[in-house]
Amino acid sequence: MEIVNKKAYFNYFIDSELEAGIVLKGTEIKSVRKGSVNLTDSYVRIKNNEAYIINMFIDKYDEGNIFNHDPTRERKLLLHKKEIKRLLELTSRDGYTLVPVKLYIKNDKAKISIGIAKGKKLYDKRETIKKRDLERDNRLRR
């Protein structure tokens, strides 16, 4: 099971990716395993030398009770200090940001792939659309 943030690939040039764990509450992991996650408008911010993912939507678990979670709460990411320091240095450059690219289950734990990304301009997005349309046309002609 893998949830991909397609908008990240459309809106950003992804330079490199880094795997991180996520701190989740009881009903959140059940919703993640069910696939009720949306990464579209989420981003990663570093506060007090800790990384947090903001605006990641994890739907409430249907069978949950009063202990259900808040769907868009900030979730802490599990990274080493060296990795956080490196991410701070990379994002201090002009136009770079941290974007969640994929969410997946690995060894019964939820992992997220964070992309170090630079925003695309409008003409870059048009070029991406053009390439995608040409590839689709070539596949249909075969």
Image: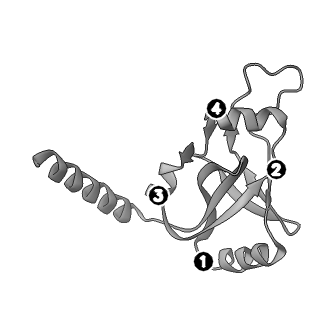
- Judge left or right: residue 113 versus residue 29: left
Give the Cα distance between marks 2 and 3. Answer: 25 Å
Marker count (numbered):
4
- Identify residue type, mark 4: Lys
Residue at 63% x, 38% y is: 37
Report which residue position mark 4 lands on. Answer: 34
Does label 2 or label 1 sit earlier along the sequence? 2
Within 10 Å of disc 2 (Cα), the crowding (few <14, some 14-19, many 20+) is some
- Judge left or right: residue 83 versus residue 34: right
Say whether residue 66 is visible.
yes
Report which residue position mark 3 lands on. Answer: 9
Say whether residue 58 is visible.
no
Q: Nearer the viewer, mark 2 or mark 3?
A: 2
Q: Is the residue 94 above or below the residue 135 in the image?
A: below
- Identify residue type, mark 1: Asp
List x then y, in percent, for residue 103. 62, 50
Residue 94: image tag: 1
Give the Cα distance between marks 3 and 4. Answer: 24 Å
Does label 3 or label 1 sit earlier along the sequence? 3
Within 10 Å of disc 3 (Cα), the crowding (few <14, some 14-19, many 20+) is some
Q: State the SS at label 2.
A: loop
List x then y, in percent, for residue 95. 58, 72
Within 10 Å of disc 4 (Cα), the crowding (few <14, some 14-19, many 20+) is few
Does label 2 or label 3 sit earlier along the sequence? 3
Q: State the SS at label 3.
A: helix
Q: Nearer the viewer, mark 2 or mark 1?
A: 2
Residue at 79% x, 78% y is: 82
Does label 4 or label 2 sit earlier along the sequence? 2
Report which residue position mark 2 lands on. Answer: 23
Q: State the SS at label 1.
A: loop
Q: How is the image coloured?
A: one colour
